[in-house]
């Protein structure tokens, strides 16, 4: 079932998501399992990472993955994994073996091979949590409107993207087959510039081709976490 949670401001939204993420990791560790979490990039996500308390959970016992990545060299400031390292992972002293970054430019013979290598590294059990931002056009990860080849991919768990409308154009992304293999999916959206995309994603009618965010959901929980600006057209 899809749930919608709205808070007044973007700052409050980041605080709320940080609290929820901490509670989820604590709960999974209490069950005796190692949590698996898929991270996203973007402004609100990085605000969340900056707010995470390194003492509040066993962050070093979490396996961290990514939903998509810019295919640029390792350490590049545009990479989602580098932003997460700078904002949180290094601060929390997460060991390298727990950080499952997507391949970087120069590490593989081709982007297709890099995508397949990442797919092979994914866990067989469902992710505990997938975090996703939503673009003004309704994209999630690097699954963009009308990129039908990627939107309808059912066999591959990760694919190469050569023509992202948002720079840089070359990326690797998980497909719906991977993103939806998750107990919980949280969509994090802030700002009135994304209100129209949120409204389309949550409307009774519409297509994944027009609004890819319509295509994601967890097996146990699908949660839209919004500030009032992002929710203003609902």
Image (cartoon, rainbow, N blue to C red):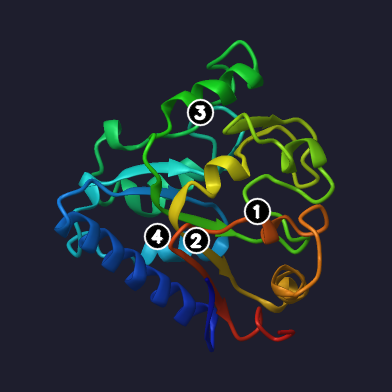
Mark in front: 1 vs 4: 1
Give the CA distance from mark 1 to mark 4.
Answer: 19 Å
Crowdedness of circle 3 by 10 Å Cα count: few (<14), some, many (20+)? some
Give the CA distance from mark 2 to mark 1.
Answer: 13 Å
Crowdedness of circle 2 by 10 Å Cα count: few (<14), some, many (20+)? many
Asked if residue 74 is positioned above or below residue 110 in the image, the reply reads: below
Mark in front: 2 vs 1: 1
Q: Are marks 4 and 2 in contact (CB under 8 Å)?
A: yes
Residue 22 location in percent, x, y? Answer: 29, 65
| Disc nearer the start of the sequence (2/3) | 2
Residue 85 location in percent, x, y? Answer: 39, 45
Q: Secondary structure at mark 1?
A: loop
Position of the C terminus, as image quadrant, is bottom right
Residue 199 location in percent, x, y? Answer: 74, 76
Asked if residue 68 is positioned above or below residue 42 in the image, the reply reads: above
Q: Are marks 2 and 1 in contact (CB under 8 Å)?
A: no
For residue 28, what is the image quadrant? bottom left
Residue that carries the numbered disc 1 in the rendered image? 140
| Disc nearer the start of the sequence (3/4) | 4
Residue that carries the numbered disc 4 in the rendered image? 49
Residue that carries the numbered disc 3 in the rendered image? 119
- What residue appears at the point 65 percent right and 61 percent down from the top-left corner? 134
| Disc nearer the start of the sequence (1/4) | 4
Residue that carries the numbered disc 2 in the rendered image? 45
- What residue appears at the point 27 percent right and 68 percent down from the top-left corner? 23
Asked if residue 28 is positioned above or below residue 20 in the image, the reply reads: above
Residue 63 location in percent, x, y? Answer: 31, 42
Give the CA distance from mark 1 to mark 3.
Answer: 18 Å
Give the CA distance from mark 4 to mark 2.
Answer: 6 Å
Give the CA distance from mark 3 to mark 4.
Answer: 25 Å
């Amino acid at each position: 079932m899809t749930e919608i949670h709205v808070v007044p401001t973007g700052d409050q939204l980041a605080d709320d998501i940080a609290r929820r993420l901490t509670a989820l990791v604590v709960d999974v560790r209490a069950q005796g399992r190692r949590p698996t979490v898929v991270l996203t990039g973007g402004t609100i996500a990085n605000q969340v990472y900056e707010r995470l308390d390194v003492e509040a959970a066993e962050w070093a016992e979490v396996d961290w993955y990514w939903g998509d990545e810019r295919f640029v060299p390792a350490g590049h400031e545009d990479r989602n994994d580098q932003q997460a390292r700078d904002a949180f992972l290094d601060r929390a002293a997460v060991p390298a073996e727990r950080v499952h970054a997507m391949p970087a430019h120069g590490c593989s013979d081709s982007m297709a091979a890099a995508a397949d290598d990442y797919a092979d590294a994914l866990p067989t059990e469902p992710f505990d949590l997938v975090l996703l931002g939503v673009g003004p056009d309704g994209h999630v990860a690097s699954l963009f409107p009308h990129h039908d080849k990627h939107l309808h991919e059912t066999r591959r768990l990760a694919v190469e993207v050569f023509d992202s409308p948002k720079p840089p154009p070359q990326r690797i992304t998980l497909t719906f087959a991977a993103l939806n293999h998750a107990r919980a999916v949280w969509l994090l959206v802030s700002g009135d510039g994304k209100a129209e995309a949120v409204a389309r994603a949550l409307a009774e009618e519409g297509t994944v081709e027009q609004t890819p965010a319509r295509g994601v959901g967890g097996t146990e929980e699908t949660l839209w976490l919004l500030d009032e600006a992002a929710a203003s057209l609902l």
